[in-house]
Amino acid sequence: MVAGEASGDLLAGLLLDGLRRRWPGLQAVGIGGPQMQRRGFEAWWPSDRLAVRGYAEVLRHYRAIVGIRNQLKARLLAEPPDVFIGVDAPDFNLDLEAGLKQQGIPTVHFVSPSVWAWRPERVEKIARSTDLVLCIFPFEAPLLERHGIRARYVGHPLAQVIPLVPDALAARQALGLAPDAPVVALLPGSRVSEIEQLAPRFFAAAALLAQQRPGLQFVVPTLPALRLAVEAAARAHAGAAQPLIVEGQSHTALAACDVTLIASGTATLEAALFKRPMVIAYHMNWLSWQIMRRKRLQPWVGLPNILSGEFVVPELLQEAANPRALAAAVGAWIDAPEKIAALQRRFDALHHELRRDTPALATHAIEELLAR
C-alpha cells in the first residue's frame, strides 16, 4: 500500500480495518502514516515524504520522490505482493501501478483521480495502470466504466466514521473551549507548502475577527511535524486571537466549531459531513497556479461545491484569499443562522448519500479481483 499524505493515511487506515477483518493474517507494507501504522502497517517510508502539492513545489522534491518510487518498485518486483493498493496520490501511484501491473501484480487504486474536475487526459493512464478503481463518489464508477476501467462505488469511508449528528458540546469540552462562545476552526492544510502559504493568511484573518468580534474562540488542529511552523505563524500573525493549537483532533475541532476557515482538499468534505459552514481558501506558488487553472474543467475547487454543483460555500483563491476577505466571509456565516440551517440540510442529504460500509465493500471488490 502507498498513502501519500494525512488524508490518504486516514482512508488507508479505515480500509485496513476491512481487509484485516477478511484476512486476519494480512501483512501490509509500503508507504504510510500513523493511522496505518496503528493498524499494524509496516511503513518502509513515512507518508509525509510524499506530501507535496503544486508543480513548482514538486520540482524541488522530484529527485527524492522518484528515488523512493524506484526503490519501492524494485522491492515489490523482487518480492511480489498479492495485491498493490495505491491510496490517492495519483501522480506517485499511477506510474508505480503501471509498472507493477505490467509484471502481473494486481493493482487497485483507492479514490478515483478527479478526471471529472481537471486533467481529463489521465483517464488513459488510469486504464493502463489499474485493474480496479475504488470510487468514493457515486458518479465516478459509471464515468470510468465508459472508458473500459473496472470501477466500484464503495461510498466515502469518512461518511461512516463521522456521526450524522455531531456533539458540539462534548467536542468543546474535550478541547477545553468555553461552551457558550462561538468557535472558529482554522485548518490551513497538512503540507509544509500549505502552512507556508495559508497559515499567515488564516491567522491574520483571525486577528481581524478577534478585533471585530470579541469573545470568538479559535482552534487550530495540526500534525505533530507541522506544529512548530504553525505556532511560529500564529505568533507572527494571530495578534489578539490567541488560537488554541492542538495536535491531530481535526474531527474534534470540526465538531466543536460554528464555522471553519479551511484549505481546499479532503478536509472540506469532512467539514461538510460535520454539517459545518465553511470558507474554502487556497494559495499556491504562482507558476503552479497558472498551470492548474488552465486544466480545470469546473468552476469549483472545493468538494462540497463540486458535489452540490453550485457555490454553496465561498471559495477564495490566490489573491482573493487575503486576510480581510477571509475574515469578512467567516463573519458573514456567523451573522446568517438561517443560511447555515439551509446549508446543514444539504450537507445532511450528502452525508446519507455517501454513507456506506466502505471497508467491507472495498474488501469485497478486492477479493473479487483476486479471485479473477
Image: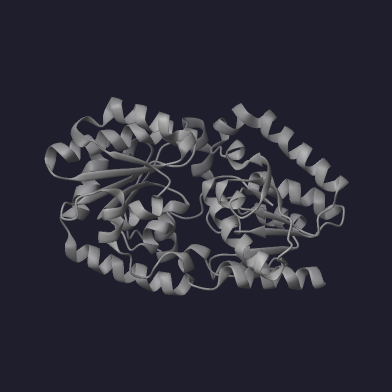
**Can residue 194 be seen in the rendering of this structure?**
yes
Q: Percent x, y for residue 234?
A: 31, 31
Asked whether, in this view, residue 153 is left or right of residue 184, the answer is right
Residue occupying image coordinates x 17% and y 39%: 210
- What color scheme is it? one colour
Query: Foreground residue, 268 or 139?
Result: 268
Q: Give the image location of residue 262, x and y in percent.
A: 36, 47
- Quarter of the picture holding the C terminus: bottom right
In the picture provided, is 219 more to the left or to the right than 190?
left
Please state the horizontal and vertical placement of residue 287, each as a whole percent of the image: 51, 31
Q: Is residue 81 left or right of residue 46?
A: right
Residue 284 % position (x, y): 45, 35
Give left or right: position of 160 versus 274.
right
Asked if one can make out residue 115 in the rendered structure from this viewpoint, the answer is no
Residue 291, by quadrant, is top right
Q: How many labels does the image show?
A: 0
Q: Say which of 110 and 9 sits in front.
A: 9
Q: Which residue is drawn at 26% across and 48% down?
A: 176
- Seen in the picture, residue 45 relative to 24 is either above or below; the reply is above
For this rendering, which residue is in front, 257 or 150? 257
